[in-house]
Amino acid sequence: MTFNPAEATAQYIDALGPAALAKAAAYTHGGHWIMLWGLVIAAIVTLIIVRLRLLERIAMRLSKRGWALRTWLIAATFFILYALLSLPWDIYSGWARETSYGRTSQPLADYLVQSAMATAIFAALGGLFFLGIYALIRRAGKKWWIWTGALAAMAISALMLAAPIFIEPLFNHYQPVPNGPVRDALVVMADEAHIPHDRIFMFDGSRQSNNFTANVSGVLGSARIAISDVAMGQASLDEVRAVTGHEIGHYVLGHVWRSIGVFALLAILLFFLADRLYPRVARLFGSETSIGDPVGLPILLFLLTILGTGALPIVNTLTRMSESEADAYSLRTVNLPDALSTALVKTAEYRYPRPGAVEEFIFYDHPSVERRVHAAMLWKAAHPATSVAHPPATHSTGNP
């Protein structure tokens, strides 16, 4: 019988069942609205901070401090204030809704503790980044925005270098993958990507999410493979190999550097537009601050949020390209199209697999699961000797 990629793809997706597909659609479409309503929340929080002159009061208390320290403290304090004011929305969108859909089992207390830690880290690092932005505005004149790309590239590179070593272990426990078939397979894959064996970890990803996750993170010698305990417990060996091959593909193909370049260019564009639009938007919020005044950070950040949302289709398109390339790398190097497909179908539980073309273009940062599975089945059709499995006949659980 001739193998039909389209029929095999439909069989994979339909195996989820009507109820699971409907739930995935509701979760995914609701997530789009969550993002858009988040802009309304951002506007409300910005208005509160600006109208109550909260940062002006802090700036007055810090008037005797040096410019750099005062600017960093104002920015860091703003991020903390923003987190506190938006906490009810954050609890709903980041915990209550996730819990209701079965995407997390994390207790609320633990969620709040980790959110507080994340806020403190973001306030410190975000404060440093905007200290750099205000230094550029202060010293580079009217063309200050040209230099924001370099600043963004340096900031992202530094974060990617430091995060696996200093930040991620604050939120999860990392330990070596135990000896056995999974580790043996990952060692071979790590050798191909020149990742040291002592950087093959598993972590308690189930603490925050029930999703199947794996990643290869780090740059400039800090790269590591990390597999969630959810994946370790719910995936087959072939699925772990296929998904890890995908993640290694991102690393080997240099997607991180392409992303840094894209975000550097995007930073220049967004800060240029923010520079032009800031006076008008500041007046709408009832503020007379200039863009170079750290007290106006709430307005600047709101502007960047709006502009960044408008740029989302472009960013998502580039990200989808990288995801497709990583899938292709996994297929070339691991040669497990069915295992990759079963792993991808598990992500369909929280990412509706059959979006419309416009929805996918605007909101999806990964190609649709249906599109990705079809690509895997096309590969299988072109390489019949690699076929080792068959599309599932029943719904499978897990979240790769």
Image: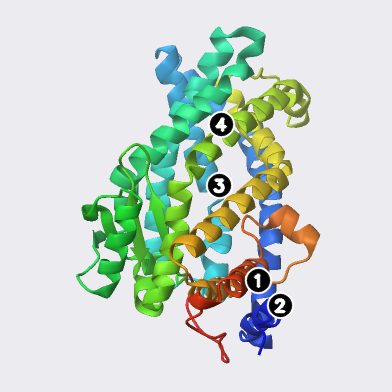
Q: Which residue is mark 2?
A: 6
Please tell me whether mark 2 or mark 4 is closer to you in this view: 2
Please tell me whether mark 3 or mark 2 is closer to you in this view: 2
Q: Secondary structure at mark 3?
A: helix
Task: Check contact, mark 2 vs mark 1: CB within 8 A.
Answer: yes
Q: Which residue is mark 4?
A: 54
Q: Is residue 124 visible?
A: no
> Quick one: label 2 or label 4, which is nearer the N terminus?
2
Residue kind at label 4, given as amino acid type: Leu
Q: What is the x, y in percent for residue 190?
A: 31, 56
In the displayed structure, would residue 297 be above or below residue 166?
above
Q: Which residue is mark 3?
A: 85
Residue kind at label 2, given as amino acid type: Ala
Judge the density around disc 2: few (<14), some (14-19), many (≥20) Cα neighbours within 10 Å. some
Residue kind at label 3, given as amino acid type: Leu
Along the line of sight, the residue nearer the viewer: 118 or 254: 254
Residue in the picture at 67% in, 54% down: 35
Along the line of sight, the residue nearer the viewer: 69 or 240: 240
> Quick one: label 3 or label 4, which is nearer the N terminus?
4
Residue in the picture at 71% in, 37% down: 307
Q: What is the x, y in percent for residue 182?
A: 29, 71
Judge the density around disc 4: few (<14), some (14-19), many (≥20) Cα neighbours within 10 Å. some
Task: Check contact, mark 2 vs mark 4: CB within 8 A.
Answer: no
Disc 2 from disc 4: Cα separation: 58 Å
Disc 4 from disc 1: Cα separation: 53 Å
Disc 3 from disc 2: Cα separation: 49 Å
Disc 3 from disc 4: Cα separation: 12 Å
Label number found at residue 250: none
Answer with left or right where residue 327 lies relative to residue 157.
Answer: right
Disc 2 from disc 1: Cα separation: 7 Å
Along the line of sight, the residue nearer the viewer: 41 or 142: 142
In the displayed structure, would residue 250 be above or below residue 208?
above
